[in-house]
Amino acid sequence: MSRRCVWILTFVLFLGLTTGVERAATPAAAQAPLPNIVVLATGGTIAGAAASDVQAGYTSGQVGVEQLLAAVPQAKKLASLRGEQISNIGSQDMNDEVWLKLARRVNELTAMPDVAGVVITHGTDTIEETAYFLNLVIKSKKPVVLTAAMRPSTALSADGPLNFFNAVAVAANKEAAGRGVLVVINDWIHGASSLTKTSTTALQTFLSPVWGLIGTVAYGDAEFYRGPVGRNTVNSEFSIEKIKALPRVDIIMAHENMDGALIDAAVAAGAKGVVIAGVGNGNMTQAALDALAAQAKKGIVCVRSSRVPTGRVGRSVEVDDDKYGFVASLGLNPQKSRVLLRLALTQTKDVKQIQKYFDEY
Ligand code: ASP
């Protein structure tokens, strides 16, 4: 064999060996264990079913968690998934019993070293309230991601499967950690304090007005822009550990010719706090103001928020909050003000302290 042939053979052998090493490395890397994500199903349209794929009428909470997981096999490439059924209800029926059960389970799961994150499937009607509640009582930095759908699982162009896939991708993404509780829907990643439902039927119903998005996610590819607004999770001083029940707080919407009857009725029904979904910057008629001030004097905590979907309710802008002893909701809409006020009332009735909570959370 000529020296040239020996050289070529040696080179080919070397090439084979090195690419062999690479080939051997690839399967080992591919075998890196997938993160464990637990899916907690609560119901909603994402688990809804209709008799036909092109009808508006349907029933929420018909499909169980195992069926939900089986419907999106692609998600199993992103994470090792297992599911638990917490409830199977339309989120219009969401209640304290489910909230406490869900929050306790999320705290248990996120404390387990082998659980990387949690995905919660939910209805869209009250997802912003559940997300904000969890944001205040979950004691972990691990990703906790809620998702939902506007169309039932049986619909033509159902949005649930891709929303679920994206939610799993975000929960499995290390960059999602420490950003508070997130809601992933229609390619957007929302913070729990900012998102709100803005359309009864449109797919792009959720917006994060004023504070903006945490990020976006396209077919599982997530980009994060910023952190959440307000104290949350590990930095929150609220806890459900010792809580058996949450105090009653009612929301009353202001309108033309409003009197104080519903404010008094709420207190008579047992409300320890009242949130007014005021007109404009948290305003209401003088009659309603007088009724509210009378309740505030008796120790009922009264928060002024707004029925206007975006913008802040500032302290003492048109209403003298110091004089009346009210709390201004600042950036929180009425439904989230109610969540914060309920948790605040588990700690104190002091109006100054509660205003501080609204400043910080
Ligand atoms: N009513 C349904 C629910 O909130 C609506 C939905 O999920 O989109 O459960």
Image (tube, rainbow, N blue to C red):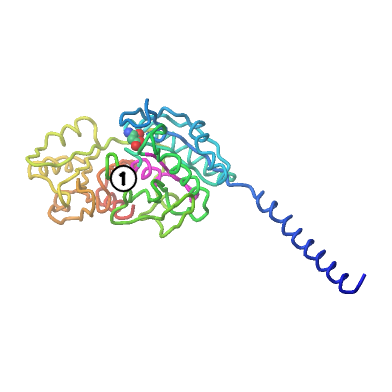
Q: Is residue 95 in view?
A: no
Front one among 333 and 200: 200
Image-quadrant location for residue 260: top left
**Rendering coords of residue 288 (x, y %):** 11, 41
Residue assigned mark 1: 205
Relative to 5, residue 322 above or below: above
For this orientation, the residue located farthest to the top is 51
Left/right of residue 59 with respect to residue 269 in the rendered view: right
Image-quadrant location for residue 156: top left
Relative to 24, residue 95 above or below: above
**Rendering coords of residue 29 (x, y %):** 67, 53
Which range of residues does the magenta coloring cover? 128-149
Q: Is residue 19 magenta?
A: no
Front one among 196 and 269: 196
Count of numbered marks: 1
> Crowding near pointer 1: few (<14 within 10 Å), some, many (20+)?
some
Ligand number 1: quarter of image: top left
Q: Confirm if mark 1 falls within 8 A of ligand 1.
A: no
Q: Is residue 32 in view?
A: yes
**Rendering coords of residue 174 (x, y %):** 52, 54
Left/right of residue 218 with respect to residue 13 in the rendered view: left
- Identify the residue at horizontal 15%, vertical 50% (top origin): 280
- Identify the residue at horizontal 76%, vertical 63% (top origin): 18
Q: Secondary structure at mark 1?
A: loop
For this orientation, the residue located farthest to the bottom is 3
Q: Given the image, on which type of amino acid does mark 1 rest?
A: Thr
Q: Quadrant of the N terminus?
A: bottom right
Front one among 62 and 320: 62
Image-quadrant location for residue 90: top left
